Image (tube, rainbow, N blue to C red):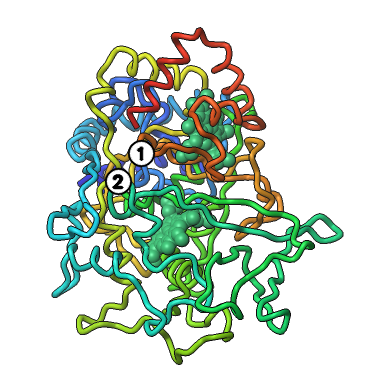
Amino acid sequence: MQSRAIQWELGLSIFLCGGNNLCANQFGYVEDFLPQAMFRHRLGDLTSSGQPAYVSHARRRLVSFGGTLMLMPPRRKVLLFSCLFAALTALGTGVVGIAANSATEAPAGFNTPSFNGAASINNGLVEPPGDTFARDQEVYEENETVADGLGPVYNATSCVNCHQNPNSGAASQITELRVGHNDANGNFVNPTILINDGKDTITGRSIVNDRAIGPQAQEHIPATENIRTLRAALNTLGDGFVEAIDDSTLIAIAAEQPQLTGGRVHGEVVMAPIFEAPGQTRVGRFGWKDQHSSLLSFIADAYLNEMGITNRLRPTEVTQVLNTTTGINDQPDELGLADIDHFAQFVRGTMVPPRDTALAATPAALAGQRLFGQVGCNACHMEAITTAPAGTVIDGGMFTVPEALGDKVIHPFSDYLLHDIGTGDGIVQVGPQDTANKLRTAPLWGLRMKARFMHDLGSLSLENAIARHDGEAHDAAESFRGLSPAEREALITFLKTL
Ligand code: HEC
Ligand code: HEC
């Protein structure tokens, strides 16, 4: 019903626009120009600071119809609006159809208590035959041994070691080491790490594992690898919804950002390879560098690079030094599911981090949320994004957005784009060289479960985290400093509700 309504809208408007391609392209921005009341009706979600939810489905269809996405000069908005108005007037009932099917809020909760999967509740994601969410969580919490393929170099023995606060799948205080150096042209180069008294090397990755199953495999950083940084473990609760955001939504956010901020904020989209669909890419959204777009890909990478467990998507050991296993470590169980499949099922099944609703309802928090919008924090820390509809095929054709994840409004307080806010770490992963000093806007959902902040966990207070914002976030940070003490306090109170 909904898609048909949108198609009518499109077909009609193209008719009204005389098939003008420019006009068709511009319908990617259709929500932006609807009268306020209609807007509310359609999206059912104007956030308290008035920021609309970015809608995946409309954009996907509209963008793919028109081809490329364009930034619209204000002059053309008038043209578009008259064109759109004519289309909507003629449609009438179509608009009602859209409103009746508007997206719903994603379920929220810290509902995966660690080591108690039997008490866990998922977001409604349907399990493969024979599998349960409790079992997925159990596999996620399993400690791997050397016999299972742990190491030779690794960081921890299970996913939950680093993703646990306050429940399985969330973040933790664990940081990891990444290093490298720049070549003569200033381009980042992955390190060459010597192990085994210099007899062997590990190359091709910037991560350095802190642990090894024996001294011969221990990694040590040569002095020449002079770019060094720490990176915090990330929250993964609700990431199934993030995976279900359509590429076109993130691209549209990036396209609009400079215009909305007078050119000050200009998030970068990077394309990340999809391991399960070789040769294909998708807009990166996971990891501090947006180095992945598919959860299964990220997880396969983590199993190898955090734990040393080879799997069907990452089949090669990091080093053969001290390796005692042969073949791929992660083999399918009796259900035909490998551990990486259970991990993906677990992460995709988690609910989004819940707000502290009692604190959020206080006058201070409400005032703080308005200020958060007013000083421009939400240019990057975007309050609401809507996922693609159920049935949308993503991840290079390897995953179909299920009912549980489709058409959901989430409040990640991120645009999932890379920005230079002056805290860059010098590391390049899948993006071009200009991403060396950029980081993904830290999603602020689940923030109240953190005691230290920023990619390096170097900020021991929220005030310090904000004070470190510069570069693209200079004006927002400056505006924050310009607030009265009571206003600053209110904004911080709002952050503590997330
Ligand atoms: C030693 C700690 C550690 C272990 C073990 C670990 N992770 Fe992570 N995880 C991290 C860190 C650090 C990041 C951020 C990585 C980056 O961007 O460099 C991360 C990021 C992620 C993300 C991306 C989240 C986002 O929203 O961007 C996913 C998904 C994830 N981990 C899943 C897993 C799974 C599944 C396992 C088990 C196979 C696992 N991790 C094991 C530390 C760990
Ligand atoms: C230009 C985009 C941008 C703007 C504007 C911006 N931020 Fe950020 N924010 C980021 C990025 C990128 C990071 C991650 C930086 C890092 O870890 O080094 C971040 C990190 C944070 C963190 C740390 C989160 C964590 O999990 O450790 C907080 C808190 C935060 N921002 C709050 C704010 C507030 C409050 C404002 C407004 C005064 C603001 N930000 C404005 C991009 C932005």
Q: Is mark 2 on a helix, strand or loop?
A: loop
Q: Quadrant of residue 322?
A: bottom right
Residue at 37% in and 54% down: 163
Lateral position of residue 48 relative to residue 476, left or right: left
- Is residue 479 among what the camera can see? yes
Q: In which quarter of the image is residue 477?
A: top right
The percent position of residue 65, horizontal first and vertical second, equals 44, 51
Q: Nearer the viewer, residue 334 or 323?
A: 323
Q: What's the residue type where badge 2 is placed?
A: Pro
Query: Looking at the image, is mark 2 or mark 1 earlier in the sequence?
Result: 2
Coordinates of residue 106 in the picture (x, y in percent): 24, 43
The residue sitting at 42% across, 41% down in the picture is 14
For residue 255, say whether it is visible. Answer: no
Using a 10 Å C-alpha cutoff, classify the residue at mark 2 as few (fewer than 14 neighbours), some (14 to 19) or many (20 or more): some
Given residues 253 and 479, the one toward you in this image is 479
Looking at the rendered image, the quarter that the C terminus falls into is: top left
Dot 1 corresponds to which residue? 449
Element carrying mark 1: helix
Please give the residue where the numbered disc 2 appears in the rendered image.
166
- Any mark on residue 298, and which? none
Q: Distance between the residues labelled 2 and 1?
A: 7 Å
